[in-house]
Amino acid sequence: MIMRILGEGQYEIAEEHLARLNELDSALQSAADAGDETAFTTALSALLDGVRTLGTPLPDETITPSELVLPDADTSLTQVRALLSDEGLIPG
């Protein structure tokens, strides 16, 4: 799966890492649902760090569609709430 972090770049994520990223996404969803800004900031940072750590960065010159686009670390709770579905940011 190809994931993009807005303003940063694309990462290729192996299938075996999706469960861990979904755990991080669930924490983000819970923080957003609770309206807890501190927990939200921590959860968003952890999710983005997870993508960076578990994913393989694609070269900037590689142009390929992203299957999933994640907000950058400066995105507000209100903005992320608008992006969330029942499954969070990462379906599955």
Image (cartoon, helix red, strand yellow):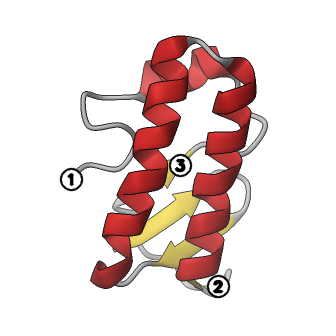
- Which residue corresponds to the image point at 34% horizontal and 69% vertical from the top-left? 18
Given the image, on which type of amino acid does mark 3 rest? Answer: Leu
| Residue 19 position in % (x across, y down) | 32, 66
Question: Which numbered marker is on residue 70?
Answer: 3
| Residue 52 position in % (x across, y down) | 64, 73
- Within 10 Å of disc 1 (Cα), the crowding (few <14, some 14-19, many 20+) is few
SS state under label 2? loop
Q: Residue under circle 2?
A: 61
Given the image, on which type of amino acid does mark 2 rest? Answer: Glu
Given the image, on which type of amino acid does mark 1 rest? Answer: Gly
- Within 10 Å of disc 3 (Cα), the crowding (few <14, some 14-19, many 20+) is many
Q: Looking at the image, is mark 1 or mark 3 earlier in the sequence? A: 3
| Above or below, 40 relative to 2 | above
| Residue 28 position in % (x across, y down) | 52, 37
How far apart in space, not on screen, are marks 2 and 3 (Cα)?
Answer: 20 Å
Q: Residue under circle 1?
A: 92
SS state under label 1? loop
- Within 10 Å of disc 2 (Cα), the crowding (few <14, some 14-19, many 20+) is few
Question: In this rendering, which labeled residue sits more in front, label 2 or label 1?
Answer: 1
- Which residue corresponds to the image point at 64% horizontal and 30% vertical from the top-left? 40
Rendered image quadrant of residue 21:
bottom left
How far apart in space, not on screen, are marks 2 and 1 (Cα)?
Answer: 29 Å
Q: What is the number of callouts on the image?
A: 3
22 on left or right of 36:
left
Q: Is residue 65 visible?
A: no
- Which residue corresponds to the image point at 21% horizontal and 53% vertical from the top-left? 92
How far apart in space, not on screen, are marks 1 and 3 (Cα)?
Answer: 15 Å
